[in-house]
Image (cartoon, rainbow, N blue to C red):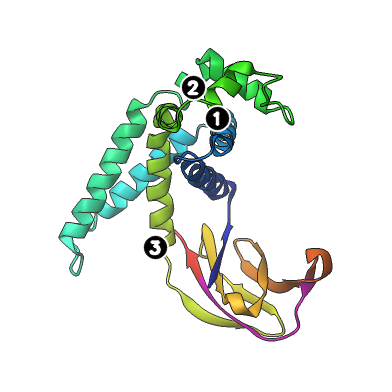
Amino acid sequence: MILFEYPFNERVRALMRLESLFDRLMFFAQPGDPRMHQVALSVLFDLLDATERTDMKGTVLQDLERQRLVLASLRDHPGVDARVLTAMLDEIERATAGLSAMGKTGQALRENEWLTSLRGRLAVPGGGTQVDMPSFHAWQYRPGNERCSDLQRWMAPLMPLQAGIAIVLRLLRESGERTSEVARQGAFQQMLAGKVYQLLRVWVDESIGTFPEISANKYMVWIRFAAQGGEHKPQAVSGDIPFRMTLCAL
């Protein structure tokens, strides 16, 4: 099954974009070819760009506090596993403490003159070559364990934000109930009956070869399935498409 997710608002969209960047950063920061580590640095700078203009730290702290209050109110609720609840509350408290102690997001990286210079060079197409920045070329020839150690040190100031985002999105994704649906002649719509959602998750069998094109507002969800034709151009499908979906709200 292929999972597609559609955020209902810009706040969740921003969190999902950061989640994707962190996932890419962690992958390319692993031991490997220096060209992988150049990609890791480019992603690190993308994260700095994404957090410069908005207070993502404050947004995540607010979301964590909101969920802490909701979960804390369930302590005496019958049927709630006290150990699981306590573990979740402890995880939220650790993430909150880490975020509160991190200061301005990525400030230490912005104060690093070498990284600032490299950031400007990598923003230019092909700008990370020895012609533009010999010191970066030399860094790429350092032993792999040294490069990884540097990357881990530069990533560390952003890890509290990554931990907070992971908790918020995990709680959001776990908040809904999965249902089985069928898109008749490739189309599906559902009224939302006034309930506000933050995320739609759609699972499609990979063997069907289709993908959902989704639009939604506070009143209704529309899903139209398409397939990739020549040159991968989307083409609407006319058959019935079975799929699964979850509407998530915190």
Residue kind at label 2, given as amino acid type: Leu
- In what quadrant of the picture does the C terminus appear? bottom left
Quarter of the image where one finds residue 175: bottom left
**63 or 124: nearer the viewer:** 124
Q: Earlier in the sequence, mark 1 or mark 2?
A: 1
Q: Earlier in the sequence, mark 1 or mark 3?
A: 1
Alpha carbons under labels 1 and 3: distance apart: 29 Å
**63 or 41: nearer the viewer:** 41
- Mark 3–mark 2 contact, CB under 8 Å? no
- Residue at position x 60%, y 73% from top? 191
Does 186 sit left or right of 28 as displayed?
Answer: right
Alpha carbons under labels 3 and 2: distance apart: 34 Å
Does 14 sit left or right of 155 as displayed?
Answer: right
Q: Secondary structure at mark 2?
A: helix
- Residue at position x 37%, y 26% from top? 102
Residue kind at label 1, given as amino acid type: Leu
Does 2 sit left or right of 232 as displayed?
Answer: left
**153 or 20: nearer the viewer:** 153
- Mark 1–mark 2 contact, CB under 8 Å? yes
Residue at numbered disc 1: 48
Q: Position of residue 120 (x, y in %)?
A: 66, 21
- Residue 239 within the magenta-colored segment of the rendering: yes
Q: Position of residue 50 (x, y in %)?
A: 58, 35
Regarding residue 193, the answer to whether it shows in the image is no
Where are the magenta residues, as a range?
Answer: 235-245
**138 or 165: nearer the viewer:** 138
- Residue 203 within the magenta-colored segment of the rendering: no
Q: Is residue 8 above or below residue 108?
A: below
Residue at numbered disc 3: 174
Residue at numbered disc 2: 109
Q: Residues within 10 Å of mark 3 (few under 14, many from 20)?
A: some
Q: Secondary structure at mark 1?
A: helix
